[in-house]
Image (cartoon, rainbow, N blue to C red):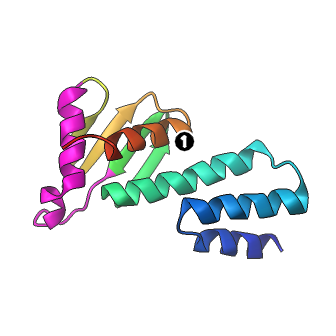
Amino acid sequence: ERLNLYKELNQIKDNDNLISFEQKLIDRFGKLPNKIAILFNAIKLRWVGKKLGFEKIVLKNNSLRAFFTTDKNSNYFESVNFKKIMNYLRENPKDCQVKENRGKLSLRKEGVMEINQALELFNKLINQKT
């Protein structure tokens, strides 16, 4: 049964359906453990990261790394979302940085200990003015 719930969760693509799924779990199992809230935030982080154009997101050792496309000729680097990220970096130079390592460009922020902190940063980026 748990596997079926994970499959159903993996099919959810928007916040409204995630809220409905959460309510379904509460109705079925009662109060949900905190780990479920963390899981839901991880899903939201993946959605916002994808919307921002990140191909991969890594959160470990109190550090966030969000990787941009490796295609240097991609139109992404002319996109509104990439411009939002660059504007945010110009306005907040001490908050996070863009670095290139072995041909991979990534956004990095130190001191990110929880998923909700990464989600907060991504929401700032998505709401940044161009």
- Residue 20's image quarter? bottom right
The answer to which quarter of the image holds residue 87 is top left
On screen, residue 63 versus residue 10, left or right, reads left
Q: Is residue 92 magenta?
A: yes
Q: Left or right? Give the position of 73 relative to 12.
A: left
40 on left or right of 61? right
Extent of the magenta region: 67-93
Q: Where is residue 101 drawn, in percent x and y? A: 22, 47
Q: Residue at x 40, y 37 (%)?
A: 121
Judged from this view, the residue extending furthest toward the top is: 94
Residue drawn where x is 66% and y is 58% of the image: 19
The amino acid beneath tag 1 is Ile
Residue 30's x, y, as percent? 89, 53
Comparing 49 with 13, the one in front is: 13
Dot 1, how many residues are within 10 Å of its Cα: few (below 14), some (14-19), or many (20+)? some
Q: Is residue 71 above or below residue 46?
A: below
Image quarter hosting the N terminus: bottom right
Q: For residue 43: magenta? A: no
Left-right relation of 63 to 100: right
Instruction: Please name the residue that numbered disc 1 is placed on.
Output: 115
The residue under the point 63% across, 53% down is 40
How many marks do you count on the picture?
Answer: 1
Of 112 and 76, nearer the camera is: 76
Query: In the rendered image of this protein, does residue 74 appear above or below residue 62?
Result: below
